[in-house]
Image (cartoon, helix red, strand yellow):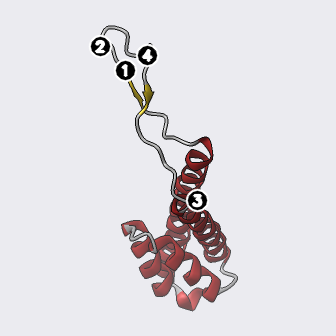
Amino acid sequence: MSEDREGLLSAGGILSIIVGVFEIIGGGALVVWRIVGCVPFWESPSLLLPNYGGACIMHISPMWWIIGGGILVVLGIIAITGGISAIKRKSFGMSLAGAICAFIPFNILGLLAIIFVSLGKREF
């Protein structure tokens, strides 16, 4: 039974790390796109020359995109830290906090991380 719990704890930590990496990438992309001024999707005036001419069709100007991206980056950092803590079996509180931060954007992998870390509490 202990081996099963140990595997669940490691799985929860790995899931937290994976979701944390995606949160950092997604949040960083939101911040960068706001700083650049537009999402790099191009609308071409010609079907024959799709990369010739065109204009940026989606402008991201609200400050909310930077705030949301920054929050995602912070959540990702906490999720990665919690995942590492779960794998090393250092702190149950930090591991659970990381799993919760992985779940906050309502990610099914984050929910699984919470369940797996909770089931592996005795390993700390």
| Label 2 element class | loop
Q: Are marks 4 and 2 in contact (CB under 8 Å)?
A: no
- Pointer 1 and pointer 2: residues touching (CB < 8 Å)? yes
Spatial CA distance of label 1 from label 2 is 7 Å
Asked whether the residues under the numbered discs 1 and 3 touch, taking CB atoms below 8 Å apart as contact, a structural biologist would say no
- What amino acid type is highlighted by mark number 2? Leu
Q: Position of residue 30 (x, y in %)?
A: 54, 52
| SS at mark 3 in the image | helix
Q: CA distance from mark 1 to mark 3?
A: 28 Å
Q: Regarding mark 1 in the picture, which secondary structure is present there?
A: loop
Q: Which residue is mark 4?
A: 51
Q: Earlier in the sequence, mark 1 or mark 4?
A: 1
Q: Mark number for residue 47?
A: 2
Which residue is painted at 37% across and 15% down in the image?
50
State yes or no: discs 1 and 4 in contact (Cβ < 8 Å): yes
Please, which residue is most extreme toward the top here? 48
Rendered image: mark on residue 57: none
What residue appears at the point 59 percent right and 53 percent down from the top-left corner?
31
Question: Which of the two discs, 2 and 3, labels the residue nearer the N terminus?
Answer: 2
Kind of residue at disc 3: Ile
The reply to whether residue 26 is visible in this rendering is yes
Marks 1 and 3, the one that precedes in the sequence: 1
Identify the mark at residue 66; answer none if there is no mark: 3
Q: Nearer the viewer, residue 13 or 52?
A: 52
Image quadrant in which you'd find residue 87? bottom right
Measured in 3D between alpha carbons, the distance from the residue under mark 4 to the one under mark 2, in whole angstroms, is 9 Å
Nearer-the-camera pick, 14 or 33: 33
**Residue labelled with disc 1:** 44
Q: Is residue 49 above or below residue 89?
A: above
Q: Which residue does the image show at 36% across and 68% down from the upper left? A: 108
For image coordinates 55% across by 65% down, the residue present is: 72
